[in-house]
Amino acid sequence: RLPLGVDWPSLPAASPEAQCEALARMAAVACAAVDPEVAVLSADFLAPEHLELVARRCADYLILPPRLELSRHFPQDFSSGVIRSALALLEKPLGLSSFDFI
């Protein structure tokens, strides 16, 4: 379980500050390895208003932190994002204009 020191099973019952700190540490670990522009968090216990706190804490760990987004439907959002990214890569080489139908 990364990052070390986070009690993930009890996190939903923890304070919002503890939740935000744990999610910021997890995002920092993942982003340090992958270096994305956007990181999507999905946690039923995370309120949208806490996303800014997670982003500030993540910025404490990373020089260039990614933009953070909250997803309530992660599998669906992930699939849609992968499809959009793949189609965007094909758009220019194939001379296509836009994939607005997705």
Image: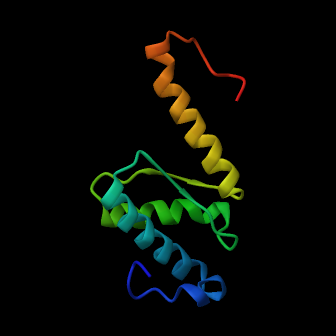
Tell me where residue 39 appears, x and y as whole percent. 48, 53
Seen in the picture, residue 60 relative to 97 is either above or below; the reply is: below
Q: How is the image coloured?
A: rainbow
Res 63 → quadrant: bottom left
Residue depicted at 33% across the width and 66% down the height: 60
Res 3 → quadrant: bottom left
Residue depicted at 59% across the width and 84% down the height: 11
Seen in the picture, residue 66 relative to 8 is either above or below; the reply is: above
Furthest residue in direction left, as rendered: 63
Front one among 102 and 32 = 102
Tell me where residue 1 appears, x and y as whole percent. 44, 82
Tell me where residue 4 appears, x and y as whole percent. 38, 84
Q: In which quarter of the image is the C terminus?
A: top right
Tell me where residue 91 appears, x and y as whole percent. 51, 19
Front one among 55 and 1 = 1
Front one among 84 and 66 = 84
Res 58 → quadrant: bottom left
Furthest residue in direction front, as rendered: 94
Residue depicted at 60% across the width and 17% down the height: 98
Seen in the picture, residue 88 relative to 75 is either above or below; the reply is: above
Seen in the picture, residue 95 relative to 54 is either above or below; the reply is: above
User: Count the marks: how many?
Assistant: 0
